[in-house]
Each structure stands twice: as structure tokens, then as C-alpha cells.
Amino acid sequence: MDTGAATVALRGAGLRVTAPRLAVLGTLGNHAHLTADAIATSVRDRLGAVSTQAVYDNLEVLLVVGLVRRIEPAGSPARFELRVGDNHHHLVCRGCGLVVDTDCAVGDAPCLTPADDGGFTIDEAEVIFWGLCPACSAAATPAAASA
């Protein structure tokens, strides 16, 4: 996300425009599915000294206002992305940890209908598909690929 678009998004969400927020959004605009630590490293590269806690605090604010989405694949640190509001899903490689967006199987949120909704008003379904990416599949032996 470029600085102009980030500024408009922050103001539209009622947030102050700050250098750390712009840096977080800029980082996620260039690289989706980053961990908070990777985002912090990038923000420091852009701005100099910024605490990891400041990055976490800014990510939390951006999550609350809906500018950022967090996904949490099992056994992996949380990842963050700018693609929000469309209820897409993710593919995660068991080999290298690559995370890739995949569009919803049906299209409209929540994309899936549970057998019993328990009285809930469901507005989102989070699905993570696990497997091997093309590079890991090509590198895997036939025995490893079937395990």
C-alpha cells in the first residue's frame, strides 16, 4: 500500500496518521502473510528505532478497525495481511511454510454452511488448506510426499 492510500485508509478509519502505521501498512502492501517480527524488522529498516511492542500495538489497532487481517495457521506464528473483507481462505505449505491466498469456494461470506450453526449468526468462515507447495512437492521424495 503506497503512502497516499495508507493515509486515506487510516483517516477513513478515524486513526491518526503516524510513521509506524504507514510503515506497517507499506510493509504489508509489499509482502502479505508476514509475522509480526518480520513486520517489525521491515518497519525498523524504514524508520530506524521502533520497538517491537509499538509494532504489535499498531497491528492490534489496525486489526480492530479492519485494515489488517490476522491468520493463525496451527503450529505457526500469526501472519498479517491487508486483504480484508472478502472472506478468502489460505493454502499453507507443510514443507516451507509458504502462505498463499485462495478465493472462497462459494464466493459470498461465510463461504461454508455448518451442519448446525448453534443459533449463531455466522459472518465468516476461516479455512486453511494444508499441503506442499509446487517447490516442496518437486523436492519431496515419493515416500515423503505420501506421508
Image: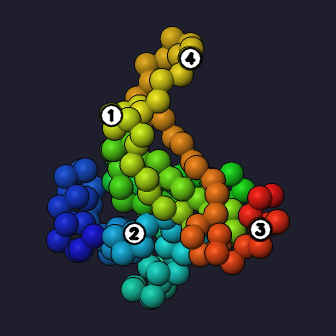
Q: Determine whether, in the image, residue 1 is placed left or right of residue 48.
A: left
* On screen, residue 23 above or below 58: below
Residue 121 % position (x, y):
43, 19
Q: CA distance from mark 2 to mark 4?
A: 36 Å
Residue 95 % position (x, y):
69, 68
Few, some or many C-alpha atoms within 10 Å of disc 1 (few <14, some 14-19, many ≥20)? few
* Identity, as a three-letter code, of the amino acid under mark 4: Ala
Residue position marked by numbered label 4 in the rendering: 115
Residue position marked by numbered label 3 in the rendering: 142
User: Looking at the figure, which quarter contains the C terminus?
Assistant: bottom right
Query: What residue is rendered at 47% in x and 30% in y?
Result: 112
* Identity, as a three-letter code, of the amino acid under mark 2: Leu
Few, some or many C-alpha atoms within 10 Å of disc 4 (few <14, some 14-19, many ≥20)? few
Q: CA distance from mark 1 to mark 4?
A: 18 Å
Residue position marked by numbered label 1 in the rendering: 108
Few, some or many C-alpha atoms within 10 Å of disc 3 (few <14, some 14-19, many ≥20)? few
Instruction: Check disc 4 and report its element: helix, strand or loop.
Output: loop
